[in-house]
Image (tube, grey):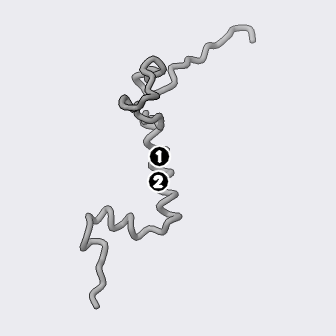
Amino acid sequence: MNRIEPEDICEPEWADWYRLTPLDRWEQSARLWATYTTLGGTLDPDPDTQSPFNDPEARREVTADGGSGVHLLRRSGV
């Protein structure tokens, strides 16, 4: 019986991913999420404008750099 290799059904990048153990995939995913957020990505969900619970007034603006928009102020004499 012929064995199906991952490269037979998908791209080489995906074949490498499928060969990882579940723990290795989990750890790699954690690294990818860390990189995503470091580059300014957000984990906030996209608004669902079709939802009856959607409140456009409740949305917060995202800053251009993806940060919180909070600035640290230095106080003198502290």
Q: Is residue 3 above or below residue 30?
A: below
Instruction: Point out residue 73 in the picture as x, y percentages from the top left corner.
Output: 61, 13
> What distance separates the C-alpha of mark 1 from that of mark 2?
6 Å
Q: What's the mark number on residue 29? A: 2
Q: Are marks 1 and 2 in contact (CB under 8 Å)?
A: yes
Which residue is under mark 1?
A: 33
Q: What's the mark number on residue 52? A: none
Residue at image location 48% in from the left, 50% down from the top: 31
Q: Which amino acid does label 1 sit on?
A: Trp
Residue nearer the viewer, 5 or 56: 56
Residue nearer the viewer, 6 or 72: 6
Q: Work out which quarter of the rendered image holds the N terminus and state it.
A: bottom left
Residue at image location 68% in from the left, 10% down from the top: 75
Q: Quadrant of residue 4?
A: bottom left
Residue at image location 43% in from the left, 41% down from the top: 36
Instruction: Point out residue 58 in the picture as x, y percentages from the top left corner.
Output: 48, 20
Q: In this view, does 52 lie above or below 61?
A: below
Q: Counting other residues with Cα less than 10 Å from the Cα at mark 1, is it few (<14), some (14-19), or many (20 or more)?
A: some
Q: Is residue 73 above or below residue 22?
A: above
Residue at image location 41% in from the left, 31% down from the top: 51
Q: Counting other residues with Cα less than 10 Å from the Cα at mark 2, is it few (<14), some (14-19), or many (20 or more)?
A: few
Residue nearer the viewer, 43 or 58: 58
Q: Is mark 2 on a helix, strand or loop?
A: helix
Q: In which quarter of the image is residue 54?
A: top left
From the viewer's perspective, tell me whether residue 15 is left or right of residue 68: left
Q: In this view, does 33 lie above or below 62?
A: below
